[in-house]
Each structure stands twice: as structure tokens, then as C-alpha cells.
Amino acid sequence: MSLKNKVAVVTGGNSGIGKAIALELARQGANIVINYRSRPEDTADLERQINALGSQAVGVQADVSKLPELDRLIQTAVAKLGRIDIMVNNAGIESRTSLLDTTEQQYDSVLDINLKSAFFGTQLAARQMIQQGAGGRIINITSVHEDWPMPGNLPYCLSKGGMRMLTRTAGVELAPHNILVVGVGPGAIATPMNQATLQNPAQAAKLNAAIPLGRVAKPEEIATVVAFLAGDGASYITATTIFADGGIMQSSPGL
């Protein structure tokens, strides 16, 4: 598989799953626009790693929950690298709050970063791809919780459920332009978001026991799925979600 000379934008791209995606797409030959909101030193280090792989890397600091900054990200990608072929809507946070406890601020933060940024990231990238005239790939990093309740983390589940329908509906709308829209739904992944659970031996053991494969995934195992979906081998996949969850959705009533 080769993505040589393709240009990919990865939101939330300097840590966790986003960083792994950026590196894997670069290994396949793509040039990468790394969106980040904080830790510029991590972005600079990732740029060096991507350059060492023979690909170009451009870091763009932008809060993708704000439409003007998201638009600036897309415009910078085109100005610096000439086009956009792959848009990965990866940026995400969670509040770990229930229906009864969630504040308006928590709700707005989670929905704006997770869902609003994916909606307008899809819109802006699609407009650019249509202008280019060669189709493209939009990949939304969702979660098993787009379909699977997680009591005590309702805004997050709501945002991922919204991404589910964004993926399906945008995939249908954009199909005539040969723009494929696919979700990737990770299960439990060893990322900073899950750090507290994984550092607690009892909680980590409980989580591993709930997964048929017996372990949480590495971010790189999600990145390879994204790279496949960005390549020619996935040319007939759109308007759906590919789950990479170690079988947990089929074996447990919820977490």
C-alpha cells in the first residue's frame, strides 16, 4: 500500500491515536499536516520523526472547536502542501460525567471538540476535495461508544453517536464526488485519555478481562486501520464504521 504524495490532515495529531495515525500515514508516503492545540514541543518532535521517514510535516496550532481556526487549518494545509487528499477528524476529549452531573460548559466542550469539529472538518475538507476534482477520504475517529452506552460518560457517547450519523449521511451525500467517509471505532486503547484506568492495577485487570483478546490496543493498531482506509484497498468502503475493539462489543454489556 502506498499513499505517496498524498496530503493528510490529522486533527489532535501530536499525541495518542492521532500521533500514531500521523506516523503510519507518513510511513505509507503521505505528507502530514499535524493539528494541535497544546504542547508545541511534542509537535516539533513529531515533525522530525515524519521528516526522517522521507515525508513532509507541517504543524498547525488551531482550536478545531472554533470554525475560523478550523478553516485556517484547512487553508494552511493547502497553502503549504498544495492540496488535501485525506482528512482525519481525530481530536477528542471526554468529561466522564453523567446526565445528572454534566454542566453546560462540560457539554459544550465535549460536543464542540468531538462533534462540531468533525462536522465542519468534513465540510471544509470536502469542499476542497471537490474543488480539486480527484475525490478523497474523510476518516472520523469515533468509538465503540457511538453505538454502545457508557453510563457516567454521556456527553462523550452523545458526541460519538453524532459522529456515527455524520459518517453515514456525509458518506451518502459525498459519494457522487468520489469522497469516501468512514468511521473508525476504537475500543479500549492505551492513550493518555485512559491513563488513569491503566495505571490502576485492579481497573486495568478488569478492563483486560472484559476484552476477548485479553488486552487493550496500542494506538498503532488503530493507525494501521486508518492507513488501510486511506488507501486503494478500501475504495468501496463508505458511510459506515469499522470497529477495532478486540471483540469487546460482542462480549460485554457496557463499561
Image (cartoon, rainbow, N blue to C red):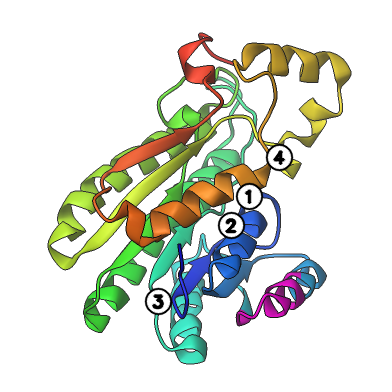
Q: Nearer the N terminus, badge 1 or badge 3?
A: 1
Q: Is 239 rendered above or below residue 68? A: above
Residue 116 - label: none
Mark 4 near mark 1, Cβ–Cβ under 8 Å? no
**Distance from Cα at disc 2 to Cα at disc 1:** 6 Å
At label 1, the amino acid type is Ile
Mark 3 near mark 4, Cβ–Cβ under 8 Å? no
Label 3 CA crowd tier, 10 Å (few <14, some 14–19, many 20+):
many
- The magenta region covers 46-57
**Residue 197 image position (x, y, % from top left):** 78, 26
Q: Is 235 rendered above or below residue 178? A: above
**Distance from Cα at disc 2 to Cα at disc 3:** 16 Å
**Residue 138 image position (x, y, % from top left):** 37, 59
Residue 107 in magenta stretch: no
Label 2 CA crowd tier, 10 Å (few <14, some 14–19, many 20+):
many
Mark 1 near mark 3, Cβ–Cβ under 8 Å? no
At label 3, the amino acid type is Ile
Image depth: mark 3 or mark 4 in front: 3
- Per the image, the residue denoted by label 3 is 84
- Per the image, the residue denoted by label 4 is 193
**Distance from Cα at disc 2 to Cα at disc 4:** 16 Å
Left or right: where 41 falls relative to 158? right
At label 2, the amino acid type is Ile
**Distance from Cα at disc 1 to Cα at disc 3:** 20 Å
**Foreground pick, 41 / 54:** 54
- Per the image, the residue denoted by label 1 is 17
Q: Where's the C terminus, which quadrant?
A: top right
- Per the image, the residue denoted by label 2 is 21
Q: Nearer the N terminus, badge 2 or badge 4?
A: 2
Residue 49 in magenta stretch: yes
